[in-house]
Image (cartoon, rainbow, N blue to C red):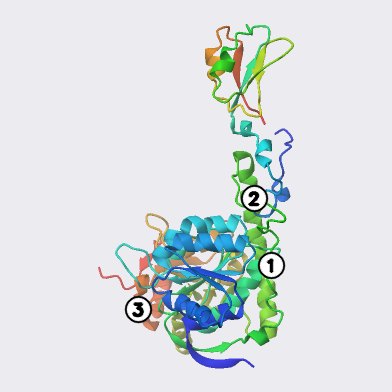
Amino acid sequence: MTRRVGMEVSFALSEAVKNCNVDVISAYPITPQTHIVEELSQMVADGDLDAEFIMVESEHSAMAACCGASAAGARTFTSTASQGLQLMSEIVFIASNMRLPIVMAVANRSLSAPLSIWGDHSDVMANRDSGWIMFFVESGQSVHDHVYIAYRVAEDSRVLLPTMVNLDGFQLTHVIEPVELIEKADLGDFLPPYDPQIQLNPLKPVTMGPAGTPAMFTEAKKAQEVVTWNSRAIIDEVWEDFGKRFGRHYKAVETFHTDDAETIIVSMGGLSGTARAAVDKMRKEGKKVGLVRIRLFRPFPAEDLRRILSPAKVIAVCDRAISYGGPGGPLCSEIKSAFFGYSGAPYIANFIIGLAGRNVWVTDFEHIADRAQQLVLQEEPAPYEIIGLRE
Amino acid sequence: MAQSDKPRWQELEIGCIVTDPGSTRYYKTGDWASMVPVTDPERCARCGLCWVFCPDMARIRDQRTGAFDVNEFYCKGCGICARECPTNAITMQEVTD
């Protein structure tokens, strides 16, 4: 029986990691990820989880230990945030080309300076091209579910890629939500034991992570690019299977009131809940506004977005990061790229919201929808706008 | 482009693992070269200066004729041999493959 309990989202995540029977956890504590790994180390200490919890001196070592454990054939977990992700970044990029199916939860938090412990997406966007599969979840339930989904996808012999579950720091990690916990017994064969296709094994020695000469590197990168794109079919397959078993259906791009919408707000992560409330309110006022929530950021669901967003007049893309000196928000930049060269693209406006955990209200999303409609009337395309900026 | 004996991207092992021990013996560092020395055996004075100066021991001597030539498995194409050759028997050419 599934239990529906009120639970801090960090703990709901740790509970799922426990149910996945991970073999090795290596992590270094950093706000706002701390509750996740504290809970896991407690589970290991109490004997509730039969795993190695490797205490390390830094996030760089945490990811290095995860790579080593995963290469030895262990189901491996880590979690970090912000500066921690930056410190481990060197190894993050290595895990993907070595095809190590590590699962990592990133409690998204802004990057210094100025020093900030609060949430936004600048940490993950700095690792955008690390070659990991990237989920953005928006509720305690989807956090819990996506740990199982992440392992199933990552370890699939057709994928074998590390997978990142992004959850907004504080706005998700530290809130208490009702979550239907999947018990280990109910998991059934949804997540079979990890069967490594490549493995460090003294009986059959191999070299993992060798040097790649100019004569090989290009081919290695092409293989990585193709396997990343191909993972999309398996991700869809796993979501479908998950839906059949547990009744919760997930998609790469989720829509809310988009069918007849003239204006569509595009959001990623935890703020989508607020955006949804705003769309509800605007719909009651007769405004044709919809919402698109992007759950899968890598591989990027460009085709889905073209199909869903094309009928609208205006798109308002909300980013929680800035690419300084570049085109604005990284998410909007991707969406503009998805439409480039296709006829009938809607007007795409970009808004920067919720940097370093600044509150984003329902009224902010109402403003974003109104403002996007005004921007269409301008002759020149507008650059991005920052919501709530004092000027 | 000439047909290559190197694997296509579809043929690489998962994660580029190396499955055979001692594989560095087959690691052709000469792949790094963008230039290759071409020696004219008629002009080669058999003095061996190219062999002395080569920083990578990539000059080989023909046991029968005594003339020197390149070992393409190791030659990085630095051009020192061509520079030092007193009879200008060596010319550097672009690698075409």
Quarter holding residue B60 = top right
Image location of residue A362, percent across then percent down: 40, 83
Residue closest to the eye, A284 or A362? A362
Q: Secondary structure at mark 2?
A: loop
**What's the residue type where badge 3 is placed?**
Asn
Residue closest to the eye, A358 or B83? B83
Residue drawn at (72%, 36%) of the image:
B4
Sequence-first tag of 3 and 2: 2
Quarter holding residue A102 = bottom right
Residue closest to the eye, A295 or B27? B27
Residue drawn at (67%, 11%) of the image:
B67
Q: CA distance from mark 3 to mark 1?
A: 39 Å
Badge 2, how many Cα within 10 Å: few under 14, some, many 20+? some
In the rendered view, would you say A132 is above or below B75? below
Image location of residue A331, percent across then percent down: 48, 64
Q: Is residue A60 visible?
A: yes
Quarter holding residue A318 = bottom left
Circle nearer the viewer, 3 or 1: 1
Sequence-first tag of 1 and 2: 1
Residue A359, numbered label: 3
Residue drawn at (67%, 31%) of the image:
B97
On-image quarter of the C terminus of chain A: bottom left
Residue to which mark 1 is pinned: A156
Q: Is residue A260 visible?
A: no
Q: CA distance from mark 1 to mark 2?
A: 22 Å
